[in-house]
Image (cartoon, rainbow, N blue to C red):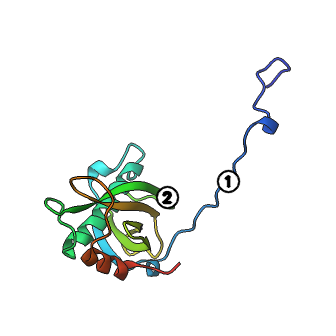
């Protein structure tokens, strides 16, 4: 119950209003170029019985980097060029939990001269739509100077195979 002496709420006329962003919809498997299996761990679950939100970001990183290593275009120990994450985001649509197997779909949405926007969809094994979908942007830099450099040609070729229109 409120009274005339209760603390007033913020006045909408003097509070900046930002538009509510539209919520993206789950994506189908056909929206992604390659898939990688991810084994969930007991430790991935939180007290609420599903995978904790921070784990999803680890899966994004693992899926993309494992693909690049397998393609022979990423040497995490001695390569002269490395990708640094400058932006990341995730939308959640359905829970995932141990002991499910997760399938990570990977695509490239934008390929610049020194940066790439990876988009990753996480699917419960066999499910047609993403349980979560997100992105991260890598800027490729010289390992020593940490200054941006062009995406190496061999890496660019692999990334172009993952590129989607749009």
So how many labels did they put on this image? 2
Examine the rendering and report whether any part of residue 99 can be seen. no
Q: Using the rendered view, name the quadrant where residue 61 is placed.
A: bottom left
Reading the image, the residue beneath label 1 is 20
Q: Position of residue 127 (x, y in %)?
A: 43, 74
Q: Which mark is residue 92?
A: 2
Position of 87 relative to 65 (above/below): above
- Which one is in front, 131 or 149? 149
Judged left or right of residue 93, residue 67 is left
Q: Nearer the viewer, residue 38 or 13?
A: 13
Q: Earlier in the sequence, mark 2 or mark 1?
A: 1
Residue at the location (31% across, 67% down)? Answer: 64
Q: Residue at x 50, y 59 (%)?
A: 91
The residue positioned 42% from the left and 70% from the top of the image is: 112
In this orientation, which residue lies closer to the viewer: 99 or 18? 18
Instruction: Indicate the position of residue 142 as horizontal and vertical percent values.
Output: 25, 59
């Amino acid at each position: 119950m409120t009274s005339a002496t209760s603390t007033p709420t913020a006045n909408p006329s003097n509070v900046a209003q930002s538009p509510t962003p539209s919520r993206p919809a789950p994506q189908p498997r056909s929206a992604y170029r390659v898939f990688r299996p991810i084994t969930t761990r007991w430790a991935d679950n939180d007290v609420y019985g599903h995978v904790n939100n921070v784990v999803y970001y680890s899966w994004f990183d693992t899926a993309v980097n494992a693909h690049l290593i397998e393609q022979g275009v990423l040497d995490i120990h001695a390569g002269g060029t490395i990708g640094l994450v400058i932006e990341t985001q995730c939308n959640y649509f359905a829970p995932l939990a141990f002991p499910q197997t997760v399938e990570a779909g990977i695509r490239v949405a934008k390929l610049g001269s020194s940066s790439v926007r990876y988009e990753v969809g996480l699917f419960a094994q066999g499910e047609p739509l993403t349980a979560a979908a997100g992105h991260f942007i890598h800027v490729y830099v010289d390992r020593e100077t940490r200054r941006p450099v062009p995406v190496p040609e061999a890496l660019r070729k692999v990334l172009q195979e993952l590129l989607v229109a749009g």
